[in-house]
Amino acid sequence: MPKRILQGTVTSDANDQTVTVLVERRFTHPVLKKTIRKSKKYRAHDANNTFKVGDTVRIQECAPKSKTKRWEVLEA
């Protein structure tokens, strides 16, 4: 099965080798027909501490690296 790839913005880089990425998705509400924005934060592995707050990055699913990290940053 292919690994999911998401795009988002780095909101935190305080931890070593970890970034927090905010991924926003837009969809149309089935009844109201109104465009809704939902967002979710993912913790992603950044081995070289390359990315800083505000960077737009792509993240990919991976095997668990820690208790909360299930994603890794692709070269953006």
Image (tube, grey):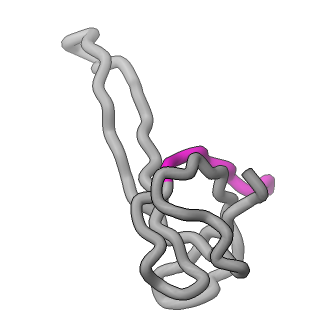
- Observer-nearest residue: 14 or 65? 14
- Which residue lies at the image location 32% right of the left edge and 31% below the top edge? 37
Q: Is residue 12 above or below residue 16?
A: above
Which residue of the protein is positioned furthest toward the left in this rendering? Answer: 32
Q: Is residue 46 left or right of residue 32?
A: right
- Which residue lies at the image location 46% right of the left edge and 66% below the top edge? 20
Q: Is residue 13 left or right of residue 65?
A: left
Which residue of the protein is positioned furthest toward the top in this rendering? Answer: 33
The quadrant in which residue 48 appears is bottom right
Q: Magenta stretch?
A: 1-9
The quadrant in which residue 25 appears is top left
Q: Is residue 73 above or below residue 4?
A: below
56 part of magenta stretch: no
Q: Is residue 26 left or right of residue 16?
A: left
- Observer-nearest residue: 52 or 5? 52
Please state, as top left, top right, bottom left or bottom right, where the N terminus lies in the image. bottom right
Q: Is residue 58 above or below residue 35?
A: below
Q: Is residue 32 left or right of residue 72?
A: left
Position in image of residue 58 (x %, y %): 66, 51
- Observer-nearest residue: 58 or 36? 58
Q: Is residue 40 above or below residue 26?
A: below
- Which residue lies at the image location 29% right of the left edge and 20% below the top edge? 29
Position in image of residue 15 (x %, y %): 47, 84
Position in image of residue 41 (x %, y %): 40, 59
Q: How many marks?
A: 0
- Which residue lies at the image location 41% right of the left edge and 59% below the top edge? 11
